[in-house]
Image (tube, rainbow, N blue to C red):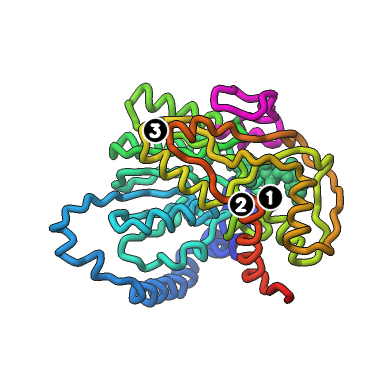
Amino acid sequence: MHENEEVKDGTSWRCARDLPIALHSLDRRTKFSRPFSQETRQLEQNTARSFPLFLWSNPAKKSLNLSNMRILVTGGAGFIGSHLVDKLMENEKNEVIVADNYFTGSKVNLKKWIGHPRFELIRHDVTEPLLVEVDRIYHLACPASPIFYKYNPVKTIKTNVMGTLNMLGLAKRVGARILLTSTSEVYGDPLVHPQNESYWGNVNPIGVRSCYDEGKRVAETLMFDYHRQHGIEIRIARIFNTYGPRMNIDDGRVVSNFIAQAIRDEPLTVQAPGTQTRSFCYVSDMVDGLIRLMEGDHTGPINIGNPGEFTMLELAENVKELINPKVKIAMVENTPDDPRQRKPDISKAKELLGWEPKVKLRDGLPLMENDFRTRLERPRKC
Ligand SMILES: O=C(O)[C@H]1O[C@H](OP(=O)(O)OP(=O)(O)OC[C@H]2O[C@@H](n3ccc(=O)[nH]c3=O)[C@H](O)[C@@H]2O)[C@H](O)[C@@H](O)[C@@H]1O
């Protein structure tokens, strides 16, 4: 069983590794947890040595009067979250705490930071309250791939609603600024194209995607209600499709599927009709946009995405040309409520954040290919 494979208990997303702990007595819990904690301690000890500890503990640093920022990233072991952590950790003034339940995230994404004196990793599910003293909360926690979020829809909507309530409660208690990563899916199957932030969307409230779409819409509502009622400092990013290294190889989303298929010489599965469009943003651009939004003066919502628009057939052709010209394209059945078009209007991000994406799809795809080839152990044939 894969380490992150979930247990089908209907309500939770435990990792398979937790199964004995969840189901057996305290004696067994001790038996199972001891080797794991030893292993973790060892990992932390080993890793810590590779960091220049003096940078953090040097008393001279105090005299520089650097104001440190303690930042919580929920979902920080995931794809976008871990890239965000990398960027935040580059700033020596930041201390970063990651809370993740590892349903779709993985410690491997954060391995270079484990043991770092400015970094902490907590196994935590945001549907439960969390009490930590922080100045900033980046609230990313939620599975984002349709196959994962549709797997346990009740848990998905709980994550979006209760998870956001818990993080807003924390923000209120400690006076932190909170950023929610909302989604282009709040626009549903949009009747306005490209989508700007004033468009209210066209979402099916009772469909198979609603747990995610409506969950994020409620999360946005909660953010604004806490802002108006309690004066919480909020930021809302509406993230459009994002791709890059560290996506789960079997994530199910289109870019990761096509790249893995091209590397494995399997047909690229274009879901019918193939004329539906998406706009793909490289992860480093996304992270830059999120940090600018957090540290800027505007609540949002603000679209963060790359306005370059492609049909799924065009995307398949690009992957074929760049990665494997011999690979076939296979038309397969689609899933219900798939949006037919999606493209962000990023005028607000440009004007208010001075942000626009830099990485073109044809430059980003090979970077992701390199990462996938390494993880799949399939080097490019010369
Ligand atoms: O990638 C993302 O960032 C977004 O992914 C999903 O939204 P969706 O646009 O449906 O993402 P995909 O599952 O990657 O699907 C995109 C399009 O590709 C098609 N597709 C998907 C997979 C595949 O193998 N082949 C294929 O043609 C789908 O039918 C769909 O039209 C999530 O719901 C969003 O929250 C998230 O922001």
Quarter of the rendering containing residue 226 = top left
Badge number at residue 253: 1
Asked if residue 234 can be seen in this view, the reply is yes
Q: Position of residue 82 (x, y in %)?
A: 48, 56
Q: Quadrant of the N terminus?
A: bottom right
- Residue 254 location, x and y as percent? 71, 50
Tell me: 12 left or right of 123: right
- Which callout, 2 or 3, points at the residue further toward the start of the chain? 3
Q: Which residues are magenta?
A: 187-216
Q: Nearer the viewer, mark 1 or mark 2?
A: 2
Mark 1, secondary structure of its residue: loop
Placement of the C terminus among the 4 image quadrants = bottom right
Label 1 C-beta lies within 8 Å of the nearest ligand 1 atom: yes
Q: Report helix, strand or loop for mark 3.
A: strand
Foreground residue among 278 and 248:
278
> Disc 3 marks which amino acid?
Ile
